[in-house]
Structures are given as structure tokens and as C-alpha cells.
Image (tube, rainbow, N blue to C red):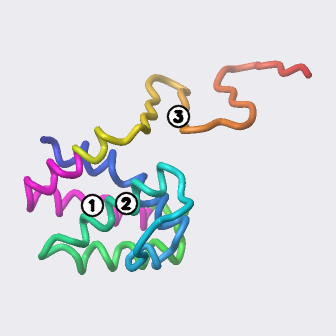
């Protein structure tokens, strides 16, 4: 299993959970009204925290990210720490892959100017010289 790819796939869910709950995602006992992305992110973080050896690094990355969830550098720190946890524990990698596979969320973007989103509630244009008429 490729740790780089898996951590890149998992990190956005964790970031979404941190964006929604801040540092309280570390201790929240249940995610009641969360959408699928936030809920999956919460479960991923909890699974990562449940492993000996990497919980301190994951926790500090989540805490830092909670202060500024839109900071791409802090998102990268969390992704790198997730990757390290995956590399250190092949069983964890399998569990995380299974969590992703069981989730009903699948968002894929491929190719130049492509976009990906779970839900798009407005207009999304990726081409040149587009005209929108209402």
C-alpha cells in the first residue's frame, strides 16, 4: 500500500473535521449532525489517535491546524504526520483504507482545469470564455 497516496487521500477528510470542530475533534465523543465528510474525518483522526507512538504528533498537528484550518502549510503538516503513522503501522494503513472504501464519498478530479467536490450548489465553470445566461 502506497503511504503517500493513502495519506493524500485521507488528509482532506481530517482537515474537514478539524475545520468543522477545531481542536475539540480530539476529544469529541460523537459527531451527531455531521455530514459524511466530517464524520469520516473525525473517525480517521480518532483511529490515528488510538495508535501508540504517533498520537502526540497527530494531536499537535490537529491542534495547530485548528488555529488556522485554511493554512496549506498546516494541512501539509497533518498529511505528513498521517503518512508517517501509516508507514510505521501497516495494520493501520489497512484499517484506514477500509474506512475509505466503506465510505460512500467518492470525489475525483482528473485533467486540466478539472474540479472535484462532494456537492456543488452553484455554478462551476472550468473553460475559457464561458457565458452564463439566466
- Residue 84 drawn in magenta: yes
3D distance between C-alphas at marks 2 and 3: 19 Å
Residue at mark 3:
116
For mark 2, what is the residue? 76
56 over 83 or under it: above or below: below
Q: Is residue 80 above or below residue 94?
A: below
When asked about the image quadrant of residue 61, the answer is: bottom left
Q: Residue at x 51, y 74 (%)?
A: 22
Residue depicted at x 47% and y 67%: 18
Work out which quarter of the rendered image holds the N terminus and state it: top left
Quadrant location of residue 87?
bottom left
Q: Which mark is residue 107?
A: none
Q: Give the main secondary structure of the magenta stretch.
A: helix
Which of pointers 3 and 1 indicates the residue nearer the eye?
3
Give the residue displayed 9% in from the left and 62% down from the top: 88
Task: Tell whether 94 sits left or right of 65.
Answer: left
State the count of labels.
3
Mark 2: give few (<14), some (14-19) or many (20+) Cα within 10 Å.
Answer: some
Answer with mark 2 or mark 3, whichever residue precedes in sequence. 2
The location of residue 9, given as percent across then percent down, is 33, 45
Marks 1/2: CA–CA distance:
6 Å
- Which percent across, then down, holds residue 28? 43, 76
Q: Nearer the viewer, residue 109 or 29?
A: 29
Q: Is residue 92 magenta?
A: yes
The residue sitting at the right extreme is 134
In the rendered image, residue 114, in percent from the top left (x then y), is placed at 53, 27
What are the residue bounds of the magenta stretch?
Answer: 73-97
Placement of 77 over or under 112, stated as above or below: below
**Mark number, residue 80:** 1
Q: Which element is circle 1 on?
A: helix
Amino acid at each position: 500500500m502506497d503511504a503517500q497516496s493513502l495519506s493524500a487521500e485521507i488528509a482532506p477528510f481530517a482537515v474537514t473535521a478539524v475545520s468543522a470542530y477545531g481542536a475539540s475533534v480530539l476529544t469529541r465523543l460523537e459527531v451527531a449532525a455531521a455530514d459524511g465528510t466530517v464524520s469520516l474525518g473525525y473517525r480517521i483522526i480518532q483511529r490515528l489517535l488510538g495508535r501508540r507512538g504517533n498520537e502526540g504528533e497527530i494531536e499537535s498537528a490537529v491542534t495547530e491546524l485548528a488555529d488556522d484550518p485554511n493554512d496549506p502549510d498546516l494541512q501539509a503538516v497533518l498529511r505528513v504526520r498521517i503518512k508517517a503513522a501509516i508507514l510505521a503501522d501497516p495494520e493501520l494503513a489497512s484499517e484506514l483504507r477500509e474506512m475509505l472504501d466503506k465510505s460512500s464519498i467518492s470525489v475525483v478530479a482528473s485533467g486540466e482545469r478539472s474540479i472535484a467536490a462532494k456537492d456543488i450548489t452553484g455554478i462551476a465553470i472550468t473553460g475559457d470564455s464561458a457565458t452564463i445566461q439566466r
